[in-house]
Image (cartoon, grey):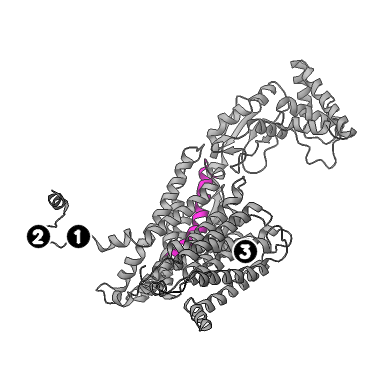
Amino acid sequence: MTLVAEKKREHRPPAGVPARASRHPLRAEFRRGFAPWAGLALLLTLAVALAASSAQWQGGWAETRERLHTTAQLLGVPLALAAGCWQGGRERRRRTEELMATAVRGGLARFLAAALPVVCWVVAGYAVAAALAMLATGLYATGDRPDLVAPVTDAVALASGALAGHALGRLLPWRLTAPLLAVAGYVVLGVVAYDSRGPLRHLSPIGYASDTDVPVWWQPPAMTVWTGGLAAAVVLAYAARRRFTALLPLAAATAAGALLVQTGEGLWHTNPAAGRQVCDTSTTPQICVNGRYEELLPQVTDALSGLTGRLDGVQNLPVRFTDLPGEPGPDEAHLPMITPLGWSVVRGRLTDPQQFAWEAGQALYGRIECDEAVGPRVAAVDDAVVHYLAPSPAERRFDELAAEGDAAARAELRDRLDARARLKAMGDEERRAWLSEYFASAGTCDPSEVPAL
Amino acid sequence: MTTSGLLLYARSRTLPRTVAALAATAALAVWAAHGLDAYLDPSRRVPVVALAPLAASALIGASLYSASDELDRTAVRPWWRRRLVHLLALTALAAALLPWAVLGHTSSFGPPAMIRNTLGCVGLTAASAVLLGARLSWLPVFAYVSAVYVAAAGVDGGSVPAWAWLMQPAGERGAWLVALVAFAAGTVLYLLRGARAEGTRD
């Protein structure tokens, strides 16, 4: 029985056909050896780096693009260089250089057969990391849209790094070439990204990382030609039968690089979505949220509902809370900061609506630019207004500290508590009139113009 | 005979070249740290404090490779003493040279932090050499260090010293504990098993 069963499991190829004839030789190159491990290492590296800081990018498409791009370039390119370099030294390590040299295929075909598996696995590792990052943001996105061009540019840069590393690995027969190349790549990219102010920084694949700026439409193709052209030139110069063909990609890369350097700061412009805002005009003041986070408007309106409800009917207020880059207009107040993500907004949710409302109340009056302190009376009035509109979550703690402090601190606390009580005790009409008078003096530094309480 | 045996061992592990490369790494670290202007803000030294031990550990890890591994394993004498001396001597050399790049600021990112990171990185590399082979021992450590370097920026929390020990100031006890455990575990693993046999495989 056993013999019969074993016979059935045996797979016999058709007569006259050698076993496994249908399998392409590259199949083994792709499935075995170092290449899958290189892809896995890149995926894990990017995943760990992205996951640890997920609160700072998840939910914002621009933040996701910027973080994914920076991480892929800063960590991925050195790793791709080193992985390619390691693979490039494979024939030397297993002492098959002479055997491979006798193959029928030309040098370029042999080079690509050994290099492409690492290139493809590295790109695959990056693609999985990018897909996971985009999925993570897609679940919590509150506006804007994903950028699918930047990942393609990153993938080309990673593939170029792996190809160039492969050529270097064949050229430099030293077992430390790969790790030192990785460290050198990391240092060079890091220095160019964070310390360089010269025009050459536009040649770095990291470029200018920003949440609010986006590149002009031709910057990604130009960067692709720059990085891909350099790698193609290195490969052709090393492995092609007609080495002068390397001049063609080198010329293309040089032209793209010159274009990037010459354009300089003009490569970047403000994200159109960041230049518009969506508003709820039913409240006083109106509430506007930047277009990049337009779906946050209901949450923000809800968080500020207590404050706007108490301001209903009050005069001399700013027309709206705005959320655009730059200073607000003369009749506007700045909405508390939504960005950078990870503080007041995490994964599409306001982390502390009470704190957000308090910050919005603070934005309605401004004596920060006064040359001198406005004095304890005005400070007590300001405190009473903020307490009435939207008290700070830390207010009780500060009051307790003042109560435990010296005589001056306790006296100031008494004044503040009295002012809060007087404002609360007013009738609705009286309070609206008083608040209207107060907000007429909201920006003054002259204590005599601030109404008494 | 013993002396010549040790000399042969040192040459077979390319130790002279490794020592020269460690000295060059330390010189490069001194040069790089000098350009960081970290007099007022010691945290500007973090790139050097993280990357120099990484490079040194890659050098030490590569030196663990033996071109005649199968022959070595037939030897009568136990290998653990040579392995111990080999690893400790190179680690001590790296720990003695690299801190010269970051003198001062001992409680934050000065010599103690550099020594801690050197110990931790060498421990991880030794463990990688046992699992993957000496010549590829740099890969997991490079991936880990670079990922942590980016991930730890701006992240706070109770578990951060455990996984981002490289980026912690020298006064952080948890980071020291993790680095020392990594060094001890990697060393013991290497002493017991040696680097994974590679032969002529890829």
Q: Is A74 within the magenta? A: yes
Which of the chains bears the disc numbered 3?
A: B
What residue did someone put label 2 on?
A15
Q: Amino acid at mark 1?
A: Arg
Residue B174, percent across and down?
63, 52
- Circle 2 marks a residue in which chain? A
Element carrying mark 2: loop
Determine whether the residue tagged by mark 1 lies in a helix, strand or loop: loop
Identify the residue position indicated by label 3 in the image.
B48
- Decide which of tag 2 and tag 1 comes sooner along the chain: 2
- Mark 3 and mark 1: Cα distance apart in space: 52 Å
Q: Are marks 2 and 1 in contact (CB under 8 Å)?
A: no
Neighbor class of circle 1 (other Cα within 10 Å; few <14, some 14-19, many 20+) is few
Residue at the spot 52% in from the left edge and 45% down from the top edge: A62
Q: Could you tell whether A206 is left or right of A414 in the image?
A: left
Q: Give the magenta range.
A: A57-83
Residue A20: numbered disc: 1
**Which numbered circle lies on residue A98?**
none
Predominant secondary structure, magenta span: helix
Image coords of residue A373 (percent x, y)? 85, 39
